[in-house]
Amino acid sequence: MGATGAAEPLRSVLWVKQQRCAVSLEPARALLRWWRSPGPGAGVPGADACSVPVSEIITVEETDVQGKHHASGKWQKMENPYAFTVHCVKRARHHRWKCAQVTFGCADEQLCHLWLQTLRELLEKLTSRPKHLLVFINPFGGKRRGKQIYEKKVAPLFTLASVTADIIVTEHANQAQDTIYEINIDKYDGIVCVGGDGMFSEVLHGLIGRTQRSAGIDQNHPRAVLAPSTLRIGIIPAGSTDCVCYSTVGTNDAETSALHIIVGDSLPMDVSSVHHNSTLLRYSVSLLGYGFYGDIIKDSEKKRWMGLVRYDFSGLKTFLSHHCYEGTVSFLPAQHTVGSPRDRKPCRAGCFVCRQSKQQLEEEQKKALYGLENTEEVEEWQVICGKFLAINAANMSCACRRSPMGLSPAAHLGDGSCDLILIRKCSRFNFLRFLVRHTNQCDQFDFTFVEVYRVKKFQFTSKRVEDDDSDLQEEGKKRFGQICSDHRSCCCTVSSSCWNCDGELLHSSAIEVRKAAWRLIAMWRKCDNDHPACA
């Protein structure tokens, strides 16, 4: 055995599964390691050495080896009557995490207690871990299994990790949002929603609104600098697509999400504000889609009686309808970012693109704050008008089980920008080719009728918008002039669509969208370098 304090490495010879192993704990590296050591001494770790970071240890508890083996009739003569069990994260395939247990046995009671004390002291220093949570369960989302998923897969893990929770099973829409406005949330370390993307959006709007109300900030002002919240949001997937969870964790597995919440994993994620005529419509964190995706959500809302199959039915119907929409898109390119939508570099833990982009964006904001320069006046806006099958703004990759790469595979979670995707009028066959590429590894932007831009802000006005809703377009004409494309005119009837904002309908055609309006700290995975943050 080495030193006996938490500041010095601890090394002992213990027993794991009836095998003699050398076990070391290095507080400086926060790493627990063990390897087979059949001979005298600790030996040198080989290729079969196992390790687990202290940050991924859920809990440590003393194990009653004597009682356990006496009941099973094994080991009549106990050579190692003292033991402790380490409950930790085990990484599985496809970004999944599982809860694993490793029991270490020894013949010395004091040595056993020393290991218990040292590991527990290290766990106590992990201040990012939640102790008390507010949990909202949507029993109606997805396959209506939200309550069952929480009770069977999540609650036992929270109990194991000594995480307490106040649970609210929602009974109607917006109950979670209203509750966050009304109750004292200061006593919680985070808010967890068990449901789909709609449930997450509801909790998000409640937390942002509550924070701005407390800070006295007018959310309706498009240029308002919103106050951040230190409260984190976690999501246990129990919806139909679980886009937000899949795009941040890499899977829609409830146990994986629960373990990330327990160990305190977090990542920053930008939020976009959507305004119309100086009125806040909604916030968006994943997809804002006009045309194709707007029509799908609009039609599917009328067919809720069909269950989850309504999305497939409405998708096919919308594809066959093949409507295009004429309008004007003006946007401010995100010159502060160091990546591009087509560089095929997904967002990862400790993402270089997000880190560098955030630094440059903060420099721009400082200059604007001190009046050195107005970035909106200095930077050049671009204006594109034409006929579009779809206009999509992706704040994240928007990945899901059916589209593992997402709508924009290289979109970043915290770079202060979103990817604006314009799909111009084309044939049904070409549009089908574009949609199919969302299900494979091919570049979905490699078409002449598809354009993608990384932007900080953008505005859209439908051609058929009424006179009292056309102020954004008139302002765009005055500031930028008209830059129209030479694409062929559309023979389809020109009509107005609606916006799909994270699965919710927005009926206003003229909108203004700004990124990095608020920075959310979410309880999601911080992936390894080889694991994309898209979950």
Image (cartoon, rainbow, N blue to C red):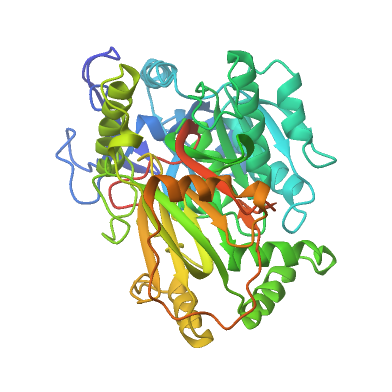
Q: Where 190 sits versus 514, above or below?
A: above
Locate residue 307 relative to residue 125 in the image: left or right: right
Locate residue 182 relative to residue 387 in the image: left or right: right
Q: Where 209 sits versus 297, above or below?
A: above
Locate residue 25 relative to residue 93 in the image: left or right: left
Point out residue 137 in the picture as x, y percentages from the top left corner. Answer: 73, 40
Point out residue 237 in the picture as x, y percentages from the top left corner. Answer: 62, 49
Determine which quarter of the picture holds residue 335.
top left
Residue at the extreme left of the image, as rendered: 44
Pick the residue in front: 372 or 255: 372
User: In the picture, which quadrant includes the N terminus?
Assistant: top left
Residue at image location 41% in from the left, 77% down from the top: 487
Pick the residue in front: 510 or 21: 510
Point out residue 12 in the picture as x, y percentages from the top left corner. Answer: 27, 27
Residue 3 appearing in the image: yes
Q: Where 424 sits versus 412, above or below?
A: below
Residue 535 appearing in the image: no
Point out residue 221 in the picture as x, y percentages from the top left corner. Answer: 56, 28
Q: Where 315 sits versus 391, above or below?
A: below
Residue at image location 38% in from the left, 75% down from the top: 486
Pick the residue in front: 281 or 359: 281
